[in-house]
Structure formats: C-alpha cells, structure tokens
C-alpha cells in the first residue's frame, strides 16, 4: 500500500522488541539510524518471559567451556531432525552465523560474556546429538544498571501474573532484553517507540519502504531507507487465526506475550508474502490453574498422564515441545480425547515437597500452588482411592487402576517398558533441575500408591506459534514464486522456522530468532557494513 504522508524517516525499522533487538543493535552498530516499534507499553515480548537459553552451536561460550560443537558437529543433528520441513540453506546460514554473532555481541560492553550450561539436546537418538547440549545464557544484570530505561522492560511472566516485585536482579530473558536495550541505545543510532503498532506495510512499486503504524495520537507513516524487519512474534494471542490454523488449540492456553496477535504476519501476507507451517507452534504442556492462563513447565517429575479412557499414552518426561506434539498427535489419532490430559499422582507429592513445591519452570512467586484454592476451583481433584478419583474426573475406574498398577511395576523394576521414561539424558537432568528424586532404582519413576490421590489438568500450551513468512538465508521475505520482496525481512516467530516442526534444544526459538534478525541487519547494511 502506498502512502504519501511521511511522519519520520529512518534507515531501518524493526517491528517488535524481543530477540529482534539483536538485528536492531547490529544495524545501529553499523551506523544505520534504526527505529524499533513495539505495540505494547513494554519491550521484550515473549523473549522477556523466557529463560533466555540460546541454542547456538560452536559459539565462544561453548568453546570456553570445552564443548566441541561447531557447524560440522551440529549439521548432522539438524539435518536428521528437521529433514525437508525447512530449507537446508536456512540451517546452513544459522550454523555459519551463530558463533560470529555471539562474538560481536560479546564485544559490546553491555552484553558481556555469555555462559554455557549443560542442557541436553532434545532428540537424544539423532546423529550428532549432545548429552551436554549446546545452550548458552546471558549473565544476570542488576536492575539499577538500566536507570530511566528500567520501566520499559517487560517483567518476567510470574511477576507479571502475580504483581509481585521481581527483585533487584534481572535474570533470564529480562536480562537479555535489558542488555540488548542498553547496547542499542549506547550506539547513538537507536530509537525505541512503544505503544506503536504496525498497521500495514508501505510499498513503492514492489518494494517495501516503510510502515503505517497506530499510536496514541493516531496513525503515522514512517519510512525506512534500507528495509523493514518484521520480528513481532507469532499469532498465538489471535483467537481467529488459532481457530483457522490450529483448531484444537485455544489462544487462551498460550504463554506468548499479550501483543502477539499476528499483525506482522498478516501485513506480510497482505502484500503477497508466502507462508509455511502456520499449523505449528513451540508446544508445551500447560498445567491448568485457577483464573489464569495455564502454567508452562518443562516436565512431569512424578505421577502419570492418562487420556479420557484412563490409559497412559506417552513418556511424560519428554522435552516439552516433543511432549506437546505427542499430546496433539495422540489426540488427533484417537477417538478418545487427550485434551485435557489427566495428571494423576498421590500424596507423596506433598509429603516430600516435590512436584508443585518447586517445578523446573513455573511462577517463582511464594506459595504459588495452593491446594485448597485449586480444589475449590475444580482444577485439582482429590479422592481417597483411585476408583473414586476416576469417577470424579470422568474416566473408567478399571482402566485408571490398571494404568497405575502397570506404572508401579515399572517403577519398582526401574524400567519403563512402555515408553522409556528415564532413558534419555533430558529425562534424567530434569530430576536434578526440580530437586526431586524418586525412591526406586530409576529416579524418574516413582510408585503411585499412597492416598489420597490427585488429578490435575494438562492442556496444550505453547511458547508461541512458529509458522510464518517464508524467507531466504538472508532473512528476506519471499513471494509464492520464490522471488524476494525487496526491503522486507522477517525473523523469530514471524518467520517460517529454520527448525521446521521440531525444537532442537533449550534456546532454539530465541537463538534462531537472534541469528535471523542479525542476518537481516547484515543484508540491510550491505557489503561495507
């Protein structure tokens, strides 16, 4: 859409303020006047909610830790698990640029050095999989370092939900966003505009030359000399699009940031951009809680999951995205409902202060799990016997009893003959992460035999949708015929993912979003940038 009135001009416009800040920083560092527009009042998007793990093979932090994982080691792994679901050229660009990007980021005073932490790759049987993992993290940051910029940064999800004070030290995604913000502003070439939402892309001929945006003061047009990077997340908070592309899933289950309603995706589609994998998301199990969105957590640490037939159907400790995909696969393949899934456990959970006391990833506010409140809300059920519990949750008592008895046999023997729970490095590391160890020979398996018994509800949550606009290896958005839409770039969950339908390891979404934001900036800066 062409627009005659111009309110402002920059070299680069970045739509969205999560990991796309890496692209903004790279552009501004190369002397390009760069504007970041953010729809909400806070910057950071879903990245600010994250643990800020970055899955980036062969980077400096890994090398410092003695991890041998360069492109040649990681390529077979990605080739095997992604396959034909995404172009190999995107994988190669990711593998070649990830490490140099980290080198550049570490050269900025505010970014400092990242550190490696051993989180296993999620597909343990694939060639090239590392049990030590390839995930790195930013260092925490004292909140006071931000000065007047501090109120701009989105709070961690647990603090945002509860209204609790997040404390004086920023960690995880908050720390990453804060560090990128400080570095971006320090270039002298960076501007941030919050409460500024993308309305449409502005075209001259077949080239994108800017954006029409909405602000508190009305509509404005901003021109971009070099290009526009769409890095505004997915469409997970858009009920209409979820119903269209993912009818089994509701936007009310998502963990995505409030502004992620697919505006950038739709704007690209309106000018002829091709899309791919719109039915996909970074899925995760979500624990249903009273009067709130489900809580994301990484793994079951005790108990079992059963469907409406009372049957156990999977390894409950699969990495969260694999777990979410397996729930969806089972639900689609069966006449029996798997949504919600029933999480059945016993009194041992509370006697030993396990499970809800300190889940691997969950709200960190004090006493977030209140048994009486959960019971009163009906999201937790309690009974003296398994038969009574089955009646309360509406599943066959005989089937539930049989499933529990079979699982107890596995727990006593130390081997889950049905689904292999406890066999993979990820299964075993979660034991340590959540601080719980079962009493049998396999620390991932615990007998369920001490009443009263409980059932919670698990739904199919996500960390954001992941299908989006097709791009080439320079993050340039493509049309259906494969031609480039000049001046338009995409990254993160606005972009059709480099990883296809899978999640390679902790930090896959943020790591790939950073790389393709960086690649977009390099292309806009040109050969001399």
Image (cartoon, helix red, strand yellow):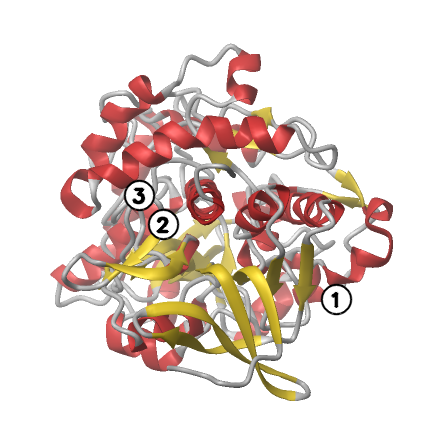
> Along the line of sight, which residue is nearer the eye, 21 or 206?
206
Q: Nearer the viewer, mark 3 or mark 1?
A: 3
Q: Is residue 354 above or below residue 74?
A: below
Q: Quadrant of the N terminus?
A: bottom left
Q: Are marks 1 and 2 in contact (CB under 8 Å)?
A: no
Q: Is residue 9 above or below residue 107?
A: below
Which residue is label 1 attached to?
163
Q: Is residue 490 above or below residue 450?
A: below
Residue at the top extreme, as displayed: 66
- On the picture, is 16 further left or further right than 486? right
Q: Residue at x 54, y 45 (%)?
A: 355
Which residue is label 2 attached to?
475
Q: Are marks 3 and 2 in contact (CB under 8 Å)?
A: yes
Q: Residues within 10 Å of mark 3 (few under 14, many from 20)?
A: some
Considering only order in the chain, which callout, 2 or 1, is on the residue closer to the N terminus? 1
Residue at the bottom extreme, as displayed: 218
User: SS for tag 1?
Assistant: loop
Mark on residue 228?
none
User: SS for tag 2?
Assistant: loop
The part of the image, by quadrant, that contains residue 110 is top right
Residue 465 in sight = no
Q: Residues within 10 Å of mark 1 (few under 14, many from 20)?
A: few
Which residue is label 3 attached to?
473
**Alpha carbon separation for disc pair 3 and 1:** 41 Å
> Along the line of sight, which residue is nearer the eye, 22 or 498?
22
**Alpha carbon separation for disc pair 1 and 2:** 37 Å
The part of the image, by quadrant, that contains residue 149 is bottom right
User: SS for tag 3?
Assistant: loop
Considering only order in the chain, which callout, 1 or 3, is on the residue closer to the N terminus? 1
């Amino acid at each position: 859409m062409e627009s005659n009135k111009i309110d402002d001009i920059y070299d680069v416009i970045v739509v969205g303020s999560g990991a796309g800040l890496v692209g903004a920083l790279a552009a501004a560092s190369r002397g390009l006047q760069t504007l970041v527009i953010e729809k909400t009042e806070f910057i950071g998007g879903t990245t600010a909610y994250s643990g800020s793990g970055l899955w980036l093979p062969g980077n400096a932090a890994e090398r410092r830790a003695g991890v041998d994982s360069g492109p040649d080691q990681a390529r077979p792994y990605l080739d095997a698990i992604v396959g034909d679901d995404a172009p190999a050229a995107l994988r190669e660009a990711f593998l070649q640029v990830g490490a140099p990007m980290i080198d550049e980021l570490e050269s900025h005073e505010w970014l400092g050095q990242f550190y490696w932490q051993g989180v296993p790759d999620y597909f343990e049987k694939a060639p090239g999989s590392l049990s030590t993992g390839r995930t790195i993290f930013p260092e925490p940051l004292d909140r006071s370092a931000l000065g007047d910029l501090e109120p701009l940064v989105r709070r961690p999800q647990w603090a945002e939900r509860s209204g609790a004070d997040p404390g004086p030290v920023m960690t995880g995604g908050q720390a990453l966003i804060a560090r990128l913000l400080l570095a971006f502003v320090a270039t002298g070439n960076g501007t941030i505009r919050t409460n500024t939402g993308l309305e449409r892309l502005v075209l001259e001929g077949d080239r994108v030359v800017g954006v029409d945006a909405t602000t508190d003061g009305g509509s404005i047009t901003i021109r971009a000399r070099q290009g526009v990077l769409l890095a505004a997340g997915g469409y997970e908070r858009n009920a209409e699009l979820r119903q269209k592309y993912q009818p089994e899933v509701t936007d009310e289950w998502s963990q995505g940031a409030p502004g992620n309603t697919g505006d950038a995706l739709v704007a690209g589609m309106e000018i002829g951009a091709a899309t791919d994998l719109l039915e996909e998301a970074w899925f995760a199990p979500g624990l249903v809680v009273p009067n709130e969105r489900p809580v994301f957590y990484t793994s079951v640490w005790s108990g079992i999951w059963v469907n409406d037939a009372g049957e156990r159907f999977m390894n409950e400790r699969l990495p969260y995205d694999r777990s979410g995909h397996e729930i969806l696969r089972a639900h689609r393949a069966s006449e029996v409902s798997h949504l919600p899934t029933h999480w059945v456990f016993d009194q041992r959970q509370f006697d030993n202060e396990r499970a809800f006391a300190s889940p691997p990833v969950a709200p960190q506010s004090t006493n977030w799990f209140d048994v009486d409140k959960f019971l009163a809300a009906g999201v937790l059920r309690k009974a003296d016997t398994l038969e009574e519990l089955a009646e309360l949750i509406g599943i066959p008592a005989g089937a539930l009893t049989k499933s529990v008895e079979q699982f107890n046999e596995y727990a006593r023997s130390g081997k889950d003959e049905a689904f292999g729970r406890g066999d993979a490095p990820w299964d075993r590391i979660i034991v340590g992460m959540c601080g719980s160890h079962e009493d049998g020979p396999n620390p991932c398996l615990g007998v369920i035999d001490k009443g009263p018994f409980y059932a919670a509800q698990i739904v199919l949550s996500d960390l954001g949708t992941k299908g989006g606009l097709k791009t080439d290896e320079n993050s340039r958005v493509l049309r259906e015929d494969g031609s480039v839409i000049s001046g338009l770039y995409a990254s993160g969950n606005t972009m059709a993912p480099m990883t296809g339908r899978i999640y390679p390891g902790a930090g896959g979404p943020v790591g790939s979003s950073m790389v393709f934001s960086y690649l977009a900036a390099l292309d806009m800066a040109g050969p001399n940038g």
